[in-house]
Amino acid sequence: MDRITTRQLFETIQERLALRWPAGIAGESRTLAASGGPSRRPSMVGYLNTIYPNRIQIIGSEELAYLDGLEARQRWETIQKILSYDPFAIIVTQGQTVPGDLLEAAEETSSPVWVSARRGHEILTWLQYYLTRTLARRVTLHGVFLEVYSIGVLVTGAPATGKSELALDLVNRGHRLVADDAPEFTLVAPDIVDGTCPELLRDLLEVRGLGVLNIREMFDHTAVKDSQYLHLILDLKPLEAISDTDGLLRLTGITGHRKVLDVALPVTTIPVAPGRNLAVLAEAAVRSHILKSKGIDPAQKFIDQQAHQLQKLPPW
C-alpha cells in the first residue's frame, strides 16, 4: 500500500487509539502517501506546527493552552492557517474538549478532527511506527527467506536448483523459516529491509516430490519466524554455469551485491553439483559473512601474506 485515506486509517486505528470523529467527516477521502524520505517536509505526523505543518497534527494540552493564549483575531488567523494546509487529520489528545471555533472551522473546510483518549506521546509513537510500515516501499522476490545464525538469508536460484530442499535441511538443523516462494520485503529505514511472509503462505514450504509441508506443525513453532531483516542473499547456481578462467574465485569465492529497494545487499553464489552438501555450504557462507562484517576476511589475508612472501624473494 503506497497511500491511505482518512476513513481507512480511522477505521484501522479507532479501537487502538480510542478515537471518535466529532467534525470534518466530509474530508474522509483525503489521502496520505509516503513522504519519500526521513527529512522530507511536511512530515506525516507530529505535534501542532504552523510553520512546517505535519500531515497529521496532534494537539495536546500545551497546544490548546497556546491557542487559548492568543488574542481573538490572532487565534482566528492561526486556526485558519492550520486548516488552510488541508491536514489529513487533527487529533486532540486525552479526550480533551475541542474548542468550538476549531470545530466550526473544521466543518466548514471538511478537515477531519479526531479526539483520542490516549496521551500525545503514545499517539505520536504508535502512528509513526504504523504509517512507516504501512506506507513503506515494498517488493516481492522469488526465493526462500530464512533466519540462519540470527541473520536474514534469502536463498535464490533458478527452478530445480534445490532451494526448498536446502531450506528444509536448514530448518532440520535448527534454523528458522520466514517465507517460501514469495517473501515480501519492506524498506523500514533508509538502509534496512525487513522480510515477511504473505498470510496465505505462512508456515508453509513446498518441496518438490513431497508437496506442501507445514513447518510449524512438523518442527514446532520455534522453526518459523514472522519477520526478519534481510542481511545476505545466497544464490544457487549449477556448477557448470560458473566460469573461473583465472582461478581467483577459488580464493575469494563468488560474491557481489544486489540492490533490493535501493539497498545494496551482499550476494554469495553457491555452486550446485551432485554430492555437495548445500546446508553445510550455506551455513559456512553465513558464518563467513558474519566474520567479514566484523572485518575478518581470510581470503584477503591469505592474498596479502602471499604478496608479502613474494616481496621477500631475491631478485632474479
Image (cartoon, grey):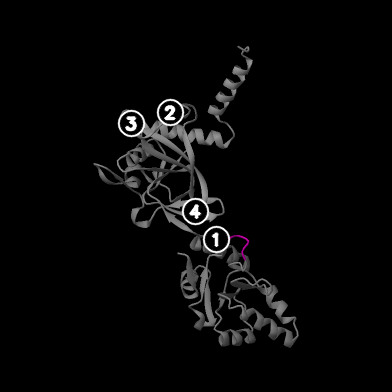
**Can residue 150 be seen by looking at this rendering?**
no
Which mark is nearer the camera, 3 or 2? 2
Q: Eyeballing the image, is 27 above or below 145?
A: below
Residue that appears at 46% across and 57% down: 138
- Distance Cα–Cα, label 1 vs label 3: 45 Å
Q: Which residues are magenta?
A: 36-40
The disc, 4 or 1, on the residue closer to the chain's N-terminal end is 1
* Amino acid identity at mark 3: Ala
Disc 1, SS: helix
Nearest to N terminus: mark 1 or mark 2: 1
* Earlier residue among tags 3 and 2: 2
Q: What separation in Å lies between label 4 and label 1 (alpha carbons)?
A: 19 Å
Q: Could you classify mark 3 by the number of other residues whose Cα lies within 10 Å: few (under 14), some (14-19), or many (20 or more)?
A: few
Q: Nearer the viewer, residue 148 or 16?
A: 148
For badge 2, the amino acid type reads: Thr
**Mark 3 or mark 4: whose residue is earlier in sequence:** 4
Residue at 56 percent across and 54 percent down: it is 189
The residue drawn where x is 46% and y is 72% is: 8
Name the disc covering residue 273, or none: 3
User: Could you give the CA–CA distance between mark 3 and mark 2, rounded to whole angstroms?
Assistant: 19 Å
Give the answer, above or below, for where 121 lies relative to 231: below
Residue 96 visible? The answer is: yes
Mark 4 lies on residue = 261
Magenta span has 55? no
Separation of residues labelled 1 and 2 (CA atoms): 50 Å
Q: Residues within 10 Å of mark 4 (few under 14, many from 20)?
A: some
Picture coordinates of residue 98, whole percent (x, y): 62, 81
- List the single residue furthest toward the left: 209
Helix, strand or loop under label 3: loop
Residue on which the image places disc 1: 129
